[in-house]
Image (cartoon, rainbow, N blue to C red):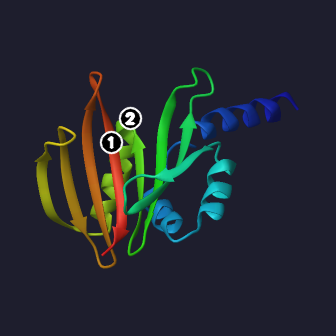
Amino acid sequence: MKRIFLFLLFISIHGSGYSQSLTLDELISLRQKDVGDITEYLIKKGWVYETSESKTSSFQGTDWKYKSKSSGKTLARLTLFEGSNEVFITYQTGELKYYNILSSRIKEFKMKKVRSEHYDQNNSILTDYEGAKYIVSTEIIPDNGGNVYMVSLRLK
């Protein structure tokens, strides 16, 4: 009985560390869902709904975040942007390992790099990849001695 408890404790601690991580396959799936389904999916992973508001004159944005249970610090953020002609989803994390997983999956999908440049507005490096159905943009933004990694997905 003690072994089973320790095993379950290990699994719950180990598994919760990846709740903030979203894969490219999850982003593709979430982009096709409505805000209710996205909220339900993320809440099961420990995320919280944050806000819905106009992000620009053209886009309504809905935000969810994943917070550290110990420090309360936001570890990841997901935003769904909905406009009259376009819907796209953006995932942000400060964790290089999660960004690397997403980057590897972009390569596995054999997406073609179509743009890579320094983006002055955010002082960031922006790279766009084009696949059969989607355009994926990655952005690396400097932040307090580290980086914020952002991956956006939209239809081609």
Residue at the (59%, 67%) spot, across then down? 34
Classify mark 1: residues with Cα within 10 Å, few (<14), some (14-19) or many (20+). many
Q: Position of residue 25 (x, y in %)?
A: 46, 64
Q: Name the image quarter holding the C terminus.
A: bottom left
Quick one: which residue is furthest to the front in this view? Answer: 57
User: What is the C-alpha distance between the residues marked 1 and 2?
Assistant: 6 Å
The residue wearing badge 2 is 94
Q: Position of residue 56 (x, y in %)?
A: 37, 55
Q: Name the secondary structure under disc 1.
A: strand
Q: Position of residue 144 (x, y in %)?
A: 30, 22
Q: Name the image quarter holding the N terminus.
A: top right
Residue at the (62%, 40%) spot, across then down? 15
Q: Is residue 20 above or below residue 54?
A: above
Q: Is residue 77 above or below residue 68?
A: below
- Left or right, 139 with respect to 7, comes to left
Residue 110: which disc? none
Classify mark 2: residues with Cα within 10 Å, few (<14), some (14-19) or many (20+). many
Q: Name the secondary structure under disc 2.
A: loop
CB-based contact (under 8 Å), mark 1 and mark 2: yes
Residue at the (51%, 32%) spot, across then down? 74
Residue 149: which disc? 1
In the image, what residue type sits under mark 2?
Gly
Say which of 11 and 72 sits in front.
72
Instruction: Kindly indicate the quadrant of the structure image that contains residue 107.
Output: bottom left
